[in-house]
Amino acid sequence: MDILTCCGLTILELIALQPSTVFDSLHLPGPKDHNLLLGQEVKKFRADGPAAVQLQWMRKWPNTPFIRYISFAGKEVLLVNSLATHKAVLQTHVYDFVKPPFFARLVGEITGVGLLFSEGEAHKRERRLLAGPFSVPSMRKLLPVFRTKAKALSHVFEQLLGEKPYTTLEGASTMDTIGVTVLGIELDTISSTYPLGFQELYDCVLHQGFLGQLIWVINAFLPIRSIVPLEANRKFVQTTTDLRKMLREIIQQRATDLANGTFKREKGESRDLLTYMLEEAELRRQETGKDIWSVNDIIGHLLNFTSAGHESTAATLSWSLYVLATNPTIQDRLRSEIKSLLEANREPDYDTISALPYLHNFIREVLRVYPPSYMAQREATRDLVIEGVSIPKGTQIDLNIPLVHQHPSVWGPNATEFDPDRWDRLSGAAATPFAFEAFLQGPRTCPGRNFALIEVKAFLVELVPQWHFLGIERRDGELLSSGEERLGRGVKLANPSLTYRPADELLVRFGRIKKL
Ligand code: HEM
């Protein structure tokens, strides 16, 4: 056989065939019923949940690498719809994509640049520098703080309950845990010189009124902050300035205390992320004579950690309590595993808690079914071909995590059911890394993954043996029952929303577990 012939085709014919396997995104399946100005956005915003419309599309076109839809002003968007495509966007071509510049300007005004919005070589450098603070040894040192904060939450339960047989918890906050673990300081101790405390400032920035939000969005297109004479604008500028000033003071004070050996650690050996960063920076300075971060860089990172870490862990804890309150069998199994552990060891260490099999399965299943950071967006920085589809520079790519987590070809026909035991029988596509994307995968995967997992586990190890979660209440105090307690019926999802969370406070009824 001629060496240039293979399977009846010459090499030249094979090369000639190559371009025809690449097709234009116009040929991809997707909804065609868009509005000329608003595209599919109204339909998305009116849906029952922030991923509801995209899930319908996935079920209609399950086998295509991308679903094509039209967004605002006729903009074409490709929605990632297969594991191979996820891998291409998040790993193989990760640095051929950036976060959409509009989104970076919008969110970056609050969260700072930090890791979230650094790109390319700068991003690689920051990931390397931050590997230490987020490493497992660093997390081991944070466990005592998580445990103390979990005990404090249990104490809040105690106070709420008093002598009553049961009462209600309205959502779980993890903000003061973030204060100690990220900044190394109790948040209520840093507010004295400011009219508003850290948490209040942070809430003001995140929850602006309608006018504030309007100015915020316009400013991302057209820099108008310095010229708009409205109170909403003045308040935003003042609040973000105060927040940064507060962080600058904490950083400078910590640097001085570390240099003088006067820094008192909140929990003995524990090391918060800020202290770790300053110690790392000092080591590098001694080695190279150069500063790796300016104070502004550190402020950016701290704002990133606060914003990326707070709402997502609070949502994971709330969803965990929701599942326990609506699944007595799962609750009993989890309690039994944790109680056995605590009988053997009252203060289990990081490795023992991490290795609890049912707790680990439970949390991964909470994050699979209710992924708090449910979506990510990217923009192509050059012309690319992914899975045979030609993607021109500037194309917007949507990654919607429930699409992978509920895809029947990945997680099977019962993909939408909550089943912690599925993690013991992983096979096929479900056993591959890109099947689980609550923290995404690849070089931009969440650095706070171990932080979040051990934090939520520490809270559950403290709460589940002491408290019974009895159900979800309506506002009138009645328990939701007969299926109403299910998501989509009595419990509605917030939409539009940046996180996957209930539309209203989750009212979890709880009572004390009787000691035998
Ligand atoms: C259950 C809790 C958490 C979830 C579900 C979560 C999820 C995610 C996801 C999906 C991303 C990727 C976003 C994107 O690239 O568009 C991300 C990035 C990030 N997360 Fe988390 N996160 C959690 C907790 C935390 C915590 C506790 C911290 C820090 C203390 C943190 C810090 C960050 C940072 C800095 C990034 C940017 C990483 C980069 O671009 O390289 N996260 N997180």
Image (cartoon, helix red, strand yellow):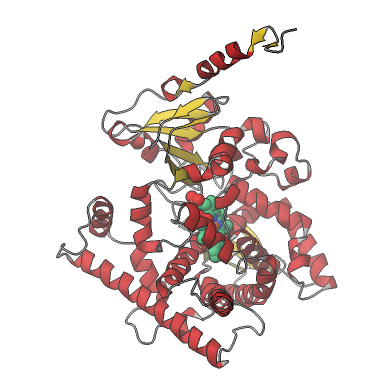
Considering the image in quadrants, where does the N terminus appear?
A: top right
Q: In this rendering, is residue 98 above or below 249?
A: above
Q: Say left or right for 163 vs 400.
A: right
Q: Say left or right for 289 vs 216.
A: right
Residue furthest to the right in view is 344
For residue 162, say whether it is visible: no
Q: In the rendered picture of this protein, how many numbered marks are placed on residues?
A: 0
Q: Nearer the viewer, residue 135 or 10?
A: 10
For residue 128, say whether it is visible: yes
Q: Nearer the viewer, residue 458 or 180?
A: 180
Q: In this rendering, is residue 249 above or below 42?
A: below
Considering the image in quadrants, where does the C terminus appear?
A: bottom right
Q: Nearer the viewer, residue 25 or 362?
A: 25
Q: In this rendering, is residue 491 above or below 77?
A: below
Q: Say left or right for 420 vs 275.
A: right
* Residue 79 rendering spot, x and y as whole percentages: 47, 34
Q: Nearer the viewer, residue 21 or 63?
A: 21
* Residue 61 rendering spot, x and y as whole percentages: 53, 24
* Residue 488 rendering spot, x and y as whole percentages: 51, 42
- Which residue appears at 53% of the width and 60% of the height? 125
Q: Say left or right for 156 vs 515.
A: left
* Residue 130 rendering spot, x and y as whole percentages: 57, 65
